[in-house]
Amino acid sequence: MKLFGQSRPRAARIARLAAVPVALVTAGSLTALSLAGGASASRTAPRSASGTYYFVSHGCPTDTFWPPVWNGAADAAKRLGIHVDILHITQAECGSTAAEVNLLETAIAAHPAGIATTVTDPTAFSSALKTAAADHIPVVVFNSAPTANGLPNAANPYLAYVGQSNYSAGVGAAHEAVSEFHLKSGAKVIVIDHEPTNISLTQRLNGIRAGFRPSGITPTVIATSDDVSSGASIVGAYLTSHKGVDAILTLGTTGTDEAVQALTADSLHIRIGAFDLDSTTLAYIERGTVTFTVDQQPYLQGYLSIVELFLDKTEGAAPVNIPTGPAFLTSSNVKELGRFVNHTGF
Amino acid sequence: MAPTPAAAATVSSRGDTSPAPPGGSQPVAGGWQLAASSALTRLLRQRELGIALVAIILFVLFSLLSHGTFDSVQNWAAIGSATAELGIVTVGVSLLMVSGEFDLSVGANFAFAALVMALMIHDGYPPLEALGADIGIGIGVGLLNGLVTVMLDIPSFITTLGTFFLWSGVTLLVTGGQTVTILNPPGVLTALGGSVSGQIRAEIFWWLGAGLVIGLLLHRTVTGNWLFAVGGKRFAARETGVPVVRTRVIAFVICGVLAAFAGAVQLGHLDSMSASFGSTYQLEAIAASVVGGCALTGGRGSILGAMIGTVVLQMLDNGLILSGVSPYWYESVVGVIVIAAVALHVRIGRLTRGAEQ
């Protein structure tokens, strides 16, 4: 009797309680979907699955290098009136190639109008890129390519590379240093390598060596680390024991910070040529602490990748390789760039 | 020797550690309503039900929102690959959670073991030896976690937080932070993570196999009963003759082996490995296990539930993208789902236990 009396309300209660979290899940997802629909920058264009383009990168959400790249892609989408979904790895996934490959595979499964992606590894993206090629999905690679010259190979098929060749950027940096610093044959130049195992920096270094060779200059490489204060002390110790250094080249923003700190600590005045651009490097150039930096123009990497995919889709124009760098930023054009920087959200 | 674990055997293989009352859930006389209520109670006692419902809701939702791209075979091959790599880790983590422990070192173990394997293949060692080294490291890492936790009598959360840092550091020391790439992958790597048919990769079958083996171990063997007993009521388990220390260490070793094996499988998929791979897995595996019905306090959970939990996380990651939602939302939505799923499990658990008494 008692059991009988309880059974129905309990069943109802069970069903009701079970419904609450399920409803919460559904509501949570729907809210996220609708909120996100309003929040995305590139959502003004009319959508259809067949007309969607995907923009995939390995950029950490908090890495200051990447917003100009993403803004470039979003601006291109807006001006062309197309729908571009910009896919990001999460902060926790920074450095995980597997996470980016998952994004790329998801994008391919959607059979989009085109995909722009970075390729940071010579093997990991291979099967995804082959699938895209087999499915006739146009793929343009930007920023990071699996080969030193940026060109596709048998394992990594894609249509074109939009980005900087690190080797030619290195050659360009050496030429710029010779002309800006009026270096003569036998001049003492040091290069700060803050990530000795990073293949991109090694490519830049090889380019620098080759670029200096015709001028009769053999640079000395100082290996430091990503830790700016210890790197600065290594550079400082070298400069104290080796007088008469004519110029310093760095291979990235970390090395630039190390060089500037070492010179400041010892009140030395040696001219610096740098690689890459962040707000600190920009300030160094405005103050004259750094004479020039090699800019790979991240905004163009985002913008032009989308333009290439759009023209491929609408006009059948085959995407071509575009070297977005090296562009040289000095105190004479830094003002001009300041306006551009404000616009691109650097 | 130790008495036969007769008492432990009364622990339900579903993982409910409360003693089964005699005839408690049998339909006694009382008419169809009682029978229906009892059937509903039995259905709800399946820990997988709640998460299966969530999975079905998400499947329908994303299929509708994605213009037919979400429910394609190709997309599920992509979801399957991502699920398998996290899923193999999760199978071990959920078994360990049933025994009342955590392993925060699975991500570091994953990368360390797979990096050693990659370096060995890169340097020309036989691939099977390299795989053996990978598994051996998994056993070693798990054994260390288990022995330190048991012998020093400290919470496994702390032990494995420590070993997470330890193995992350060792991995960086060994590789200098570099990615190791295998340009000509041997057959062993293809068998672990290569293509079986089109985009469907072998790793999915390794995941299903791991789930089946560990599921049978946990739900159909005496060792499985011991794991539930140790996780649920450790003192009672010891009193009734369950070899508590051995059972706990075994759970850590199984978890360690599966994390290392998952690393080998991902190496097979990407032919590339770096210290940062797998870095999110410790928390995602716990989230998938909890969503799938594992209790944080131990003693409750199921392998099938944890496997569906992993699928749900990967469906979210993939479905949000294909629905045109910014992937930034993924983590936020996972947060909501974790809380909602646990709320569901707690309430259903309370009610079904009430119904038995």
Image (cartoon, coloured by chain):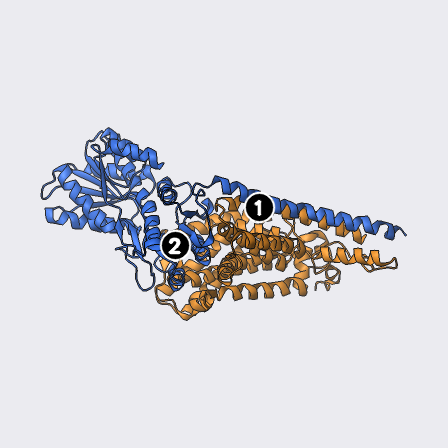
The structure residue drawn at horizontal position 67% and vertical position 65%, both measured from the top left corner, is: B220
Three-letter code for the amino acid on which mark 1 is drawn: Ser
Q: Which mark is residue A29?
A: 1
Q: Residues within 10 Å of mark 1 (few under 14, many from 20)?
A: many
Tell me the CA gap for discs 1 and 2.
Answer: 27 Å
Residue at the location (43% across, 40% down)? A41
Residue drawn at the location 30% of the way across and 55% of the way down: A317
Identified by mark 2, the residue type is Gly
Q: Nearer the viewer, residue B166 or A190?
A: A190
Which mark is on residue A241? none
Q: Give the percent coordinates (x, y) of residue A175.
A: 16, 44
Which image quadrant is residue B44 in?
A: bottom right
For chain A, what colour was chosen?
A: blue
- Can you tell which mark lies on residue A114? 2
Q: Are marks 1 and 2 on the same chain?
A: yes
Seen from the viewer's position, the closer of residues A103 and B121 is: A103
Would you say A106 lies left or right of A297 here?
right
Residue B198, placed above or below residue A229: below
Residue B233 placed where, x, y %? 70, 52
Confirm whether residue B139 shows in the render.
no
Mark 2, secondary structure of its residue = strand
**Could you tell me residue A304's position as x and y percent?**
31, 47
Q: Pointer 2 indicates a residue of which chain?
A: A
Query: Looking at the image, is mark 1 or mark 2 nearer the viewer?
Result: 2
For chain B, the rendered hue is: orange
